[in-house]
Image: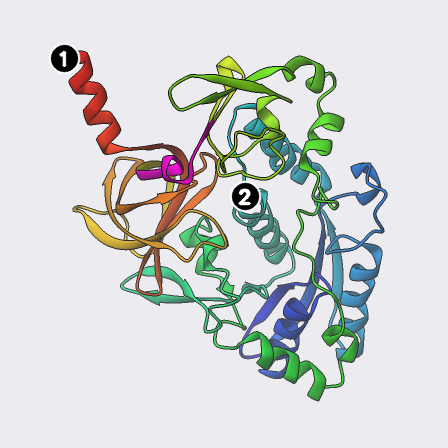
Amino acid sequence: MSKKGRVLVAMSGGIDSSLAAVLLHEQGYEVIGMTMKTWDYASSGSSKKETGCCSLDSINDARNLAVNLGFPHYILDIREEFGDYVIDHFTDEYLAGRTPNPCVLCNTHIKWDSLLQRADKLGCDYIATGHYAKVREENGRYIISKGKDLNKDQSYALWGVSQESLSRTILPLGDLTKPEIRKMAEDKGFYELVNKSESYEICFVPDNDYRGFLKRRVEGLEEEVKGGEFVLEDGTVVGTHEGYPFYTVGQRKGLGIALGYPVYVTEIQKDKNRVVLGTFDELSRDGMYVKNLVMSKYTSLDERLDSVTKVRYNDDGAPAVIEQVGDTMKVFFGNGIPAIAPGQAAVFYEGDDVVGGGWIHSSFNQQKIKNEALSNSI
């Protein structure tokens, strides 16, 4: 065995995970490649050509790279556990009126656990992925932080990885940028990787039509939920919709309603099959409650902390004061932010470091709460 140890590398067949394996191989680690089969594309019901991390081409690309560099490669079939956990959760969240984030859930509850279980069987000291993020040990804690390439930073997707898992995780691309990775692939003659298109879709919704996926997944759903009310913030009914699971907070396009001014989905009321519409200003919230916390930099927060908080993957983040109460984080945005969607992940940063994260439970407007309290007291 290499003096640096044996590492199991998650290889999707794309340029990032492939170069992560190459770098570790060159650094002297004993590399074993692993490609995870999470989804059977044919079962999606889509007519789109098979692409992405679970396609046969991607699996073969990962295997060919391993063979060419002289290290073993295995395929790990986790379709059953992926479907039972990630896809069922995805469906259940939409039916509950929330907006799920399956990629974060998959990273934290399926891929890392599956990799570590197989790593133990193969005698691997570490696991590695091609994520653009960093992990370090400091004061007995394993801390995730932003990658060098802020345009590709993926620390948001890793907040839920446990301390035990992080202690055995290597992220070789954390100090590199995407252009540097592409140049490196060119210099090494991996032209097929450089020219390979990247997929940003949910693997089990390859056509990006989550509505169609839900209709195929839940028999009779369309008939059960259609005909609900579109209402304004004051409760005024302004039309009917196709069913509450087919809308998300912050949505503007595809509403099928014209009011003479731009409106957005501001709230999903599942029990009433109502979709609340409002202006962009009405979409804004002062704060939120985040539950099911996983803390990274600190074990817990004993006092309020100034942070930058992200409420979605492509979010730049906004200044916020966070306060932990048990397994709930109260988050206060000084200027308010739009489109806080229950079901999405929220991640709290101190500088480049991930303090922790969790799932958005609900949002609030402090002034609205004060006004309602005043009205009820009169």
The boundaries of the magenta stretch are: 277-286
Q: Residue at x 79, y 55 (%)?
A: 51
At label 2, the amino acid type is: Leu
Direction bottom: furthest residue: 187
Q: Earlier in the sequence, mark 2 or mark 1?
A: 2
In which quadrant of the rendered image does the C terminus lie?
A: top left
Residue at label 2?
105
Direction left: furthest residue: 378
Q: Where is residue 333, by image quadrant?
A: top left
- Badge 2: few (under 14), some or many (20 or more) residues near its Cα, within 10 Å? many
Marks 2 and 1: CB-CB under 8 Å?
no
Q: Residue at x 71, y 22 (%)?
A: 218
Q: Position of residue 130 (x, y in %)?
A: 59, 66
Q: Is residue 84 above or below residue 356?
A: above
Examine the rendering and report whether any part of residue 62 can be seen: yes
Using the numbered discs, state the Cα–Cα distance from disc 2 to disc 1 in whole angstroms: 43 Å
Examine the rendering and report whether any part of residue 1 can be seen: no
Q: Is residue 343 above or below residue 139?
A: above
Direction front: furthest residue: 260
Q: Residue at x 65, y 79 (%)?
A: 182
Answer whether residue 79 is magenta in the image: no
Residue at label 1?
377
**Given this view, does label 2 or label 1 mark the residue nearer the observer?**
1
Q: Is residue 146 above or below residue 239?
A: below
Q: Secondary structure at mark 2?
A: helix
Query: Which labelled disc corresponds to residue 305?
Result: none
At label 1, the amino acid type is: Ser
Q: Residue at x 66, y 77 (%)?
A: 22
- Badge 1: few (under 14), some or many (20 or more) residues near its Cα, within 10 Å? few
Give the left or right position of residue 341, taking residue 123 as reference. left
Q: Secondary structure at mark 1?
A: helix
Q: Nearer the viewer, residue 262 or 74?
A: 262
